[in-house]
Image: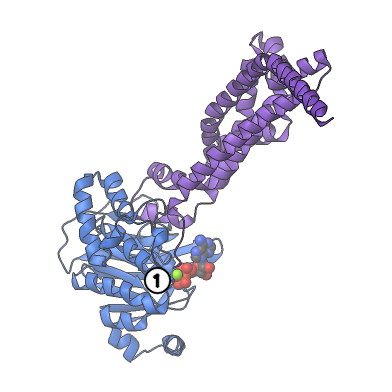
Chain colours: A purple, B blue
Amino acid sequence: MISDFISSFITEFTDLMDYVGILMPTLLAGAWVMVQLFCWTLLLSLPLGLPIALGSNVRFWPIRAFCRFYVFVFRGTPLLLQLYFFYFLLPIQFDIRLPALTTSIITFVLNYAAYFAEIYRGGINGIDRGQYEAAKALGLSKMQTMVGIVLPQTMKIILPPVSNEAIVLVKDTALASAIGLGELMKASKGAVNRDVDPTAYFVVAVIYLMFTFILTLASNRLEKRFKRYDERAVS
Amino acid sequence: MAGKKASGSAVVRHELKENLQAGDTILEMKNIVKKFDGVTAVDGVSFSMKKGEIVAIIGPSGSGKSTLLRSINGLENITDGEIDLYGTTGMVFQHFNLFPHMTCLGNITYAPIKVNGVKKADIEKRAEELLELVGLVDKRDVYPGQISGGQKQRIAIARALAMDPDLMLFDEPTSALDPEITGTVLSVMQKLAEQDMSMIIVTHEMQFARNVADRVLFMNKGKIVEEGTPEEIFGNPKSERLRDFLKAVTSR
Ligand SMILES: Nc1ncnc2c1ncn2[C@@H]1O[C@H](COP(=O)(O)OP(=O)(O)O)[C@@H](O)[C@H]1O
Ligand SMILES: [Mg+2]
């Protein structure tokens, strides 16, 4: 009896593993597309957010207005809508035909830069006025103050929200399937519809979890590095 | 050598690097007015000081002491008046304002390297002398977050001194400190006084002002109400307002 159960379990398990093995090449290809979208988006939107954040605080109002409007629009509309918009706008209005991956990267970069800009701006505004005053009293220029005093301290403040956004980005990449990008989500959906078997969704869930887990570990390590000058003593 | 006068404006700041002799005027303030939309923080203050002089500014809170001090190094833009400053300033703040992401050594050396282009090795040698002066050689490679308030303020003094200022401005340097450790900071300032550093000290430490200052200014409501030697100010206050103020601070 028990041995029957065990042997049937083993058969089912090996069947399952065989099926997963068959799925794997498709899913890994999807994962690779997802990783590309993720990395390009981070690589480009992290720096792009900085000029937008700084621009949101400048005295010259046209620049300030532009940067704030940019953030308003890209944070205030769904990413999915932005994807559709660029997917149709570029070929129809400008006759630019781009692969789905490129269109996705452009959209994601523009969108995430808006989020990062807001995080940076919050971080910069969180720096005590006394830091600027001390820098000015020492004769440091505005540029030197920003680069040497303000931004390094901002890093520590923005690290948690930035890593949080990175984790959100892992999941947001799934949206690009809507414009036909063959990333993880699309790959798994194809397999599920074809085989009428939800196994692919489980496998994909595990892959997503692996990515977010790795990111969580990485961000914890980074945070620890920036903690070294934490206030520990009382004045 | 006189600085250029900005045409049409009464606000003039000279920052002239000169080889001043003791006794030369280092700072002259003429009719300084500073308004913050509606509030007049400084209301027509004039005074001048000589190189090597130590001026203490006392007065109730809100009387414009900080604003006056901060207008000297440009942290506040004055509304009206004229400031003639012959040399450079260094400033020490009530809340230290050390750079938390740099070690104590980094705090001291950063501005000289960036602003004056001093070589790292040279300024580090100088920084060690300054750490010696403030008695914190052992805190050289420690971050500000790991030292006490009194130690922070002494590092802040060393940081300001590293720029070789001609005039040191202190804005209530001991007000944020526990009473039992103010002495460590005051004794560093005492040392500077003995080295003939020109200083303006906004302070509530009346005993200290009495001991080190050459001259004491009493401010109230944006104006200098009384001015004199420590003996005159503390020993023989003339105005009612100063008498009341001294009574209030000494009875605390
Ligand atoms: N940045 C500012 N904005 C508006 N009002 C200010 C500002 N700084 C100072 N004041 C006002 O100016 C007056 C003098 O302030 P302050 O110079 O700090 O006095 P003190 O240092 O003698 O306590 C106060 O009424 C204060 O509220
Ligand atoms: Mg004050």
Residue under numbered circle 1: B172
Q: Nearer the viewer, residue A65 or A235?
A: A235
| Residue at (54, 66) in percent of width and height | B39
Residue A225: give x, y in percent of width and height. Answer: 45, 45
Count of marks, rendered view: 1
How crowded is the residue under tag 1: few (<14 C-alpha within 10 Å), some, or many (20+)? Answer: many
Q: Kindly identify the residue that appears in the image at 33 percent across and 56 percent down.
A: B104
Q: Image quarter for residue B184?
A: bottom left
Q: In x, y percent, where is residue A42? A: 56, 29
Residue type beneath disc 1: Glu
Lateral position of residue B172 relative to residue A103, left or right: left
Residue B186: quadrant of the picture: bottom left
The relative height of residue A15 versus residue A119 in the rendered view (above or below) is above
Q: Nearer the viewer, residue A181 or B108?
A: A181
Instruction: Name the residue at 39% across, 59% down.
Output: B144
Residue displayed at 66% across by 35% down: A168
Q: Is residue A124 left or right of residue B117?
A: right
The answer to whether mark 1 is within 8 Å of ligand 2 is yes
Viewer-side residue, A50 vs B124: B124
Q: Quadrant of the N terminus of chain B?
A: bottom left
* SS category of the residue bearing label 1: loop
> Would you say residue B42 is visible in this rendering?
no
Q: Is residue A57 above or below residue A177?
A: below
Q: Position of residue A146 (x, y in %)?
A: 43, 44
Asked if residue A93 can be seen in this view, the reply is yes
